[in-house]
Image (cartoon, coloured by chain):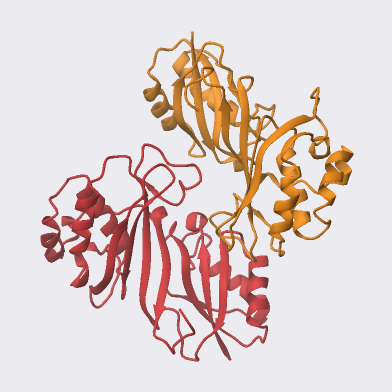
Chain colours: A orange, B red
Amino acid sequence: MRNLKLTLAYDGTEFVGWQRQAEGTSVQGVLEDALAPFEGAPVTVHGAGRTDAGVHAVGQVASVRLTATIDRETLARALNAVLPAAIRVLSVEEAAPDFHARFSATGKTYEYRIVNAPFVSPFIHRYAWHVPQALDLAAMEAAARVLEGRHDFATFQSTGTDVPSSVRTITSIGWTGGSGSDVPLVLRISGDGFLRHMVRNITGTLVEFGRGRWPASAMARMLASRDRGDAGTTAPPHGLFLTAVMYHRGSAPDV
Amino acid sequence: MRNLKLTLAYDGTEFVGWQRQAEGTSVQGVLEDALAPFEGAPVTVHGAGRTDAGVHAVGQVASVRLTATIDRETLARALNAVLPAAIRVLSVEEAAPDFHARFSATGKTYEYRIVNAPFVSPFIHRYAWHVPQALDLAAMEAAARVLEGRHDFATFQSTGTDVPSSVRTITSIGWTGGSGSDVPLVLRISGDGFLRHMVRNITGTLVEFGRGRWPASAMARMLASRDRGDAGTTAPPHGLFLTAVMYHRGSAPDV
């Protein structure tokens, strides 16, 4: 049986999220339904990141085991012909037998996009959070820097999950400039793993630093408190993009 | 009575076009309905370009006469608060008493966006025409150059209009590169006026030059024939953007 690695982009606006749900249309469900006719049987697709409703991806990775012998380029083209335009298969690669999109992942990169202007261009309003108020970017950058490294991120974890540890490593985090109604300000954050709503909770909190709610020095205490109530709001899902998933060499072809 | 110049951006996907129709939602109708409460009476908005259903704008200009004394920045903000996210007021300026968005215009610029790749990013599929086949860009550029200048463009005019002359001047036309699923190839075209579907007919024809249907030398004969049947297909509306409208200095504030 072959093991395939699919790299995907999707506009999350109309989906209930990555994961199949009892109600509504999920990205996973649409993909599994599109793959089944090639296999002649139901298939299960594993995604690296179980993105929430409304969250987008430009580099989601999924793995799927197939007996079908269709070559990978033909499969990519055929999937794109039947999938809705909101989901595109960027590539299909043969993976090692033990490759699993989620369990083999060693890291992920997310981007959170904010339009910091009086209004948002009609062409990106589905893909960025509108924050019209003036933001102190230096304060947002200084507060973000505190989060870099290995920490217990319980402060930035939403309830409703059951993970054994809330310790994670953020390998890089920082803002890249953007101003005007159609050029987003982007928080780019890479790490070995992310807790529930972690990127959105960090983003919402950093924006409150930018609006002057706390001095930048407050971030270290906030992180140490392990109390979700000490941090800021959860940024809305539609500004969030899963941009890349990292793997060890060998567990899968080039990342 | 004041005369105002509004600059607008809109995502044309969900509209029947600029102009009010018996059925469906038009950009003009939505704007007029949004302005009426400020005036306390029905208002008429004139647009520089009567864009077709599905065509977008990032620099449409409209004029409207109002008695309301609301200052222009407050009006822009208030309109953006009530308009759907698909329409944004970029600016409101006081215009000369005789300014008319359409009749005062001395030129317009359009862009036509094409994704020339095996698939289209989910984030721009509403805003670009997908042409997956290989294109000879040099041939498309050479054929485009023939159209520059003052010509009778009857070859590129769709039926169903009643204009006294089909002579227009294209002041500049050219392609700017783009490749991959999310970076469009763009035809940028400026002129003193455009016939019905002229930009889409030119684009559709240039793409056929790019696919080798005719040698570049055929464009001059095609233009001279004044026969719509000699040219290529009409490119779909969703790749087209009205990007700017030009005016003489004095008829309106800065363009």
* Image location of residue A139, percent across then percent down: 74, 56
Camera-nearest residue between B116 and B50: B116
Does B2 appear above or below A91?
Answer: below
Does B75 appear above or below A112?
Answer: below
Total marks in image: 0
Does the image show residue B19? no
Query: Residue placed at 21% from the left, 52% from the top?
Result: B138
Query: Residue placed at 33% from the left, 52% from the top?
Result: B177
Camera-nearest residue between B76 and A107: A107
* Image location of residue B135, percent across then percent down: 25, 45
Picture quadrant where residue B201 is located: bottom left
Q: In the image as oriented, which residue stretches furthest toward the top?
A: A1
Picture quadrant where residue B152 is located: bottom left
Picture quadrant where residue A12 is located: top right
Does the image show residue A26? yes
* Image location of residue A175, percent across then percent down: 64, 51
